[in-house]
Image: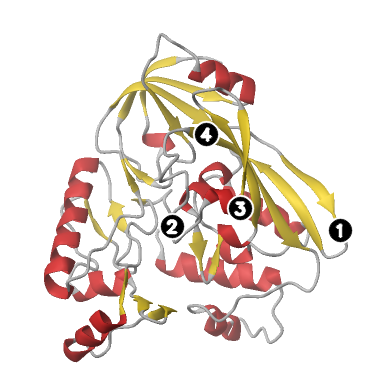
Amino acid sequence: MTIQKDISLKPYNTFGLDARASYFTKVECIQDLIKALSLEAYPNKFILGGGSNMLLTKDLDCLVIQVALKGIEIIEHQKDHVLVKASAGENWHEFVVWCLAHNFGGIENLSLIPGNVGTAPIQNIGAYGVEIKDSLVSCEALNIKTKTIETFTNAQCQFDYRESVFKQDQKNNYVIVSATFKLTTNNHQLHIDYGAITSELEAMEVKTPTIHDISKAVIGIRESKLPNPKEIGNSGSFFKNPIITKSHFEKLKINFPDIPSYSISANQVKVPAGWLIEKSGFKGKTFGNYGVHKKQALVLVNYGNAKGEDIYALAKLIQKTILQIFGITIETEVNII
């Protein structure tokens, strides 16, 4: 384990923001993670995963610890399912690809989501009708205070829409070191009714889709409307889709008859934040070297050398405008640092 001084975090965040860390270290095993967290010379520490779900608005005057634990293993193999354990530092999409190569189903709809395995449960990442909570059995997490490994079951993770116990009651108390998933080996449960998957499969001339076809379709959809972070700095969907009451929704339909929604419960619906942002006039709008992506209004982008605080100011302007127009509060999905 080596500690570096005054390091640019530009290569370590998908927004490509040139914030700096006073100190930086990469840990590749649990022992080094414990050692780094125990360093009394650096009282302030920041845990960094894949850097895909954060907006750096300032330099970090602390020890930044990048979790780079690697490894994927099958820990149980039954007739219809397997349990697969992946270390926190594994790239999420590469993990999905590994599972597909073994014909393990359950997370194909989550193809091409940026970030690492260790941060996926924190955010309960989801796409096209599937979320982490649907397949995660448990995760192992290092208690920062006691320096011991604890296991959290699916129920103990307290998953909700883009939420988990690691973002709420246990925020900053644990570092996830691995996650275990229950995946199917045959009779895969296919999820093709959400979003544009069905139409994409039709365009691919696929009549009887496999998990590989669904992954390919999802990748095609994402690549068609989401910018590649390697080309344009971004963190994917910046905002959560808000959930409002049906009575509120019915009132909005009077002035906005084309407003879309997804039923959540008897009295709640989810409204696409991207639609709200587009209707508010922000889609494709640029502010110098940053702005809102032209193909997907949910995505805020850094066109080059933007500052995190400027992008954050844009996010707050969007939130304020949507509240004024629709009476809806939209929350950020990205963590503001």
Percent x, y of residue 209? 69, 79
Q: x, y percentage for residue 180? A: 68, 48
Give the residue drawn at x 69%, y 70%: 211
Q: Amino acid at mark 2?
A: Arg
Amino acid at circle 3: Asn
Name the mark nearer the viewer: 3 or 2: 3
Q: Is residue 309 visible in this depiction of the protein?
A: yes
Q: Earlier in the sequence, mark 3 or mark 2?
A: 3
145 sits to left or right of 87: left
Give the spatial CA distance, label 3 vs label 2. 14 Å
Question: Which residue is nearer to you in this view: 38 or 219?
Answer: 38
Q: In the structure shown, which secondary structural element does the residue marked by tag 2 occupy?
A: loop
Real-space Cα distance between discs 4 and 1? 30 Å
Q: Residues within 10 Å of mark 4 (few under 14, many from 20)?
A: many
| Residue annotated with mark 4 | 175
Q: Residues within 10 Å of mark 2 (few under 14, many from 20)?
A: some
Disc 4/disc 2 C-alpha distance (Å): 18 Å
Helix, strand or loop at mark 1: loop
Question: Label 3, label 4: how many angstroms apart (C-alpha)?
Answer: 16 Å
Instruction: For marks 3 and 1, give the CA distance.
Output: 20 Å
Q: Specify the amino acid type for callout 4.
A: Val
Please report whichever mark, 2 or 1, sits nearer to the chain's N-terminal start.
Answer: 1
List the residue tagged with mark 3.
154
For label 1, the residue is: 78
Q: Residue sitting at 39 percent across and 56 percent down? A: 236
Q: At numbered mark 4, what does the secondary structure look like: helix, strand or loop? A: strand
